[in-house]
Amino acid sequence: MKIFSFLFIIFYVLAGIFHPEGFNPFTDFFCNLFQNVFKEYKGFEISEILGMAALASISSFVGLFFFNYANYSTWTEPKKVYVKTSGIVSAISMLFIFSSFHDELIIMASIIGAPAVGMVLMDTLKNKNRKKSILGLITVVLLTLYNVIFYLGFLEVIWPIFQKICIFLCLMWSNQIIKKAPLNSL
């Protein structure tokens, strides 16, 4: 499962390097790497292919993370089903953000995935793993703040870098949760 987060980083960096207009992580969003994929088909740029591979990698990671976390948790069956379902729906929604429904799919993935993220956070807090709990709290607070300032239109100048910080923290936290965890005690 961690291979998908590693692939995401590799594909993301390569897509940025090969972007024909130059990719500036301080001013460009992740979506800029594949925004023209199906708008005007003139053949694919290597950066678009790599950007789509990064998107597929991160979407796969998200779906597998929630599915596996729920499977190996001590939760009740309905809670497991909810987290698996919402995680997979969020991941599938993310997978299609290259389309003309970009904004709608991001909002949908955020709304559907938020309760699952909250349940994972509460579970890490209950397990009293200090490192995972603190990282989880920081991640969720910053991700929530990013969504608020983005959708309310505040502080536009920091959006692109804030997006990268949130992506990095989400990957770091979720990989920390699955790091060296026996399958029966995430």
Image (cartoon, rainbow, N blue to C red):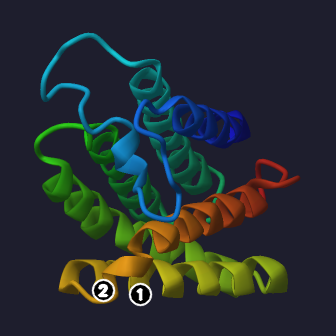
Badge 1: residue crowd in 10 Å (few <14, some 14–19, many ≥20): few
Between residue 182 and residue 28, name the one nearer to us. 28
Circle on res. 2: none
* Residue 185 location (% of width, % of height): 78, 60
Image vertical order of residue 132 relative to residue 76, above or below: below
Kindly state the secondary structure of the residue where label 1 is placed.
helix
* Residue 144 location (% of width, % of height): 41, 83
Q: Which residue is mark 2?
A: 148
Q: Are marks 2 and 1 in contact (CB under 8 Å)?
A: yes
The image quadrant of residue 1 is top right
Tell me, yes or no, if residue 75 can be seen here: no
Circle on res. 145: 1
Image vertical order of residue 32 relative to residue 77, above or below: above
The image quadrant of residue 48 is top left
* Residue 121 location (% of width, % of height): 58, 78
Between residue 105 and residue 53, name the one nearer to us. 53
Residue reaching furthest top? 43
Tell me, yes or no, if residue 106 can be seen here: yes
